[in-house]
Image (cartoon, grey):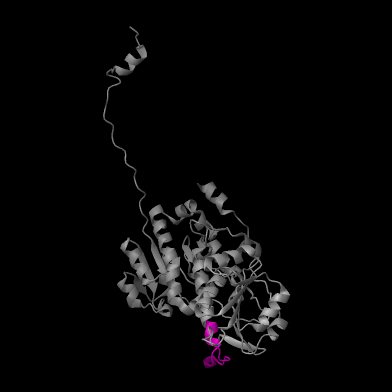
């Protein structure tokens, strides 16, 4: 008989090889960090938004976090102190007390006065406006080793900019509603209904830029019944816009002669071109504007980056328009602040999950090391400038955040 010694050896058990129960090993979860979040009242020009709504504060408080809100911080968005106190927040009347929180959440850029109130090693979520950013603010952030995160530069898991997209959708939608308003006699317009009626042709809308703003503006214009023509130098963006809208429409590259001819007949012209190196290309000359129909309306959404029209100049929510060559110009920066409640909810929806993840990870630093999208928003990290454009502008030393995180990892 064939004898398989190896088979026999496998089947035999010795005392040394006997079965013995092993202790069960369980993964020990990271201890959640309790955040102390401060929300100051914005004093910047025309800022009505607040970065966290009462509903968001309620979620954070119910998860064990502490939230302090400055008195009157949400009034611009029609959120009142009582709403926040009922959500579990503490209402503080001293701005300096709010800035003692470990995490500061702002809906407007950090001002020079606010930079002085910041505490060492704080975390600050806020937007930045590069053309208005001052070296003195950056010096305070560096000296106090702040972790400063520009929330409009944060990317999600699929690589998009969620807050920028939300604000762009708002701006695109709102600008067409503003155009419809300023075409009416109520605001000294020429008395034209944007969508027209049976037997009367609709208004002609020309949109410069096929990005998110342009797409949102086109959707609203089409919805109101207007005729829409869209210009952009990116064939890809023009194709994407048509596919997203789901209908064929007039599109063209930015060729000066065609653009000038179409502007002559336009009732509304919207400027929403993508900035190049932080500056919007000026594609509509003063001569082109002078040839537009009297009473037509220009909405320059890109005014905060220079504007698309040579005749544009910054206006305010209080005095939003001016006339030049009998053409109405609406050139208000921060359009989203005009619908502050909607904009606040959009910002809050993005920030709350990030704050929760910071707590679950154990620290903001831990989440920054894990999330590439969040790292994209960090422009100052514990005394190091991690944004190349900011470092170049103010002649600061630039430190690559990925290398910095790897060195500390």
Residue 121, percent from left and from top: 47, 60
Residue 348 seen in the figure: yes
Residue 3, percent from left and from top: 34, 9
Question: Which residue ends up furthest to the front in the rendered image?
Answer: 199
Whether residue 251 appears in magenta in the rendering, the answer is no
Quarter holding the N terminus is top left
Question: Relative to 34, is 133 on the left or the right?
Answer: right
Q: Nearer the viewer, residue 216 or 356?
A: 216
Place residue 7 in its image quadrant. Answer: top left
Question: Relative to 373, is 1 on the left or the right?
Answer: left
Residue 358, percent from left and from top: 42, 57
Q: Which residues are magenta?
A: 178-192
Q: Nearer the viewer, residue 285 or 361?
A: 285
Q: Nearer the viewer, residue 313 or 57?
A: 313
Q: Residue at position x 55%, y 91% from top? A: 191
Q: Nearer the viewer, residue 210 or 14?
A: 210
Question: So how many labels did they put on this image?
Answer: 0
Residue 45 seen in the figure: no
The vertical placement of 21 against 112, above or below, is above
Place residue 72 in its image quadrant. Answer: bottom left
Question: Relative to 318, is 276 on the left or the right?
Answer: right
Place residue 92 in its image quadrant. Answer: bottom left
Residue 405, percent from left and from top: 53, 50
């Amino acid at each position: 008989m064939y004898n398989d010694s190896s088979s026999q050896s496998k089947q035999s058990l010795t005392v040394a090889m006997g079965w013995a129960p092993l202790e069960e090993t369980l993964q020990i979860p990271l201890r959640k960090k309790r955040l102390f979040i401060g929300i100051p009242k914005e004093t910047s020009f025309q800022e009505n938004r607040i970065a966290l709504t009462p509903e968001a504060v309620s979620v954070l408080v119910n998860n064990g976090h502490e939230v302090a809100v400055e008195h009157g911080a949400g009034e611009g968005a029609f959120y009142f102190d009582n709403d926040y106190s009922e959500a579990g927040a503490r209402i503080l009347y001293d701005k300096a007390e709010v800035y003692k929180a470990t995490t500061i959440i702002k809906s407007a850029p950090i001002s020079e006065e606010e930079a002085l109130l910041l505490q060492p090693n704080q975390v600050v979520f806020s937007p930045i406006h590069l053309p208005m950013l001052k070296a003195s603010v950056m010096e305070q952030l560096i000296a106090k080793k702040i972790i400063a995160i520009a929330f409009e530069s944060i990317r999600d898991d699929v690589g998009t900019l969620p807050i920028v997209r939300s604000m762009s959708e708002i701006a695109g939608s709102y600008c067409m509603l503003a155009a419809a308003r300023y075409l009416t006699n109520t605001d000294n317009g020429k008395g034209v209904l944007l969508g027209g009626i049976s037997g009367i042709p609709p208004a002609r809308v020309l949109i410069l830029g096929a990005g998110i703003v342009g797409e949102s503006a086109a959707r609203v214009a089409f919805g109101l019944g207007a005729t829409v023509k869209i210009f952009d130098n990116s064939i890809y963006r023009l194709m994407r816009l048509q596919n997203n809208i789901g209908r064929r429409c007039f599109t063209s590259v930015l060729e000066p002669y065609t653009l000038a001819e179409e502007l002559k007949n336009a009732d509304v012209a919207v400027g929403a071109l993508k900035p190049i190196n932080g500056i919007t290309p000026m594609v509509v000359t003063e001569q082109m504007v002078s040839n537009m129909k009297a009473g037509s309306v220009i909405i320059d959404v890109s005014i905060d980056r220079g504007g698309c029209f040579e005749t544009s100049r910054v206006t305010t929510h209080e005095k939003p328009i001016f006339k030049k060559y009998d053409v109405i110009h609406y050139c208000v920066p921060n359009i989203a602040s005009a619908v502050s409640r909607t904009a606040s909810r959009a910002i809050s929806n993005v920030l709350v999950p990030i704050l929760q993840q910071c707590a679950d990870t154990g620290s903001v630093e831990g989440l920054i090391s894990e999330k590439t999208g969040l790292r994209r928003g960090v422009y100052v990290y514990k005394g190091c400038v991690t944004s190349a454009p900011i470092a170049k502008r103010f002649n600061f030393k630039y430190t690559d955040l990925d290398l910095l995180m790897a060195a500390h990892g």
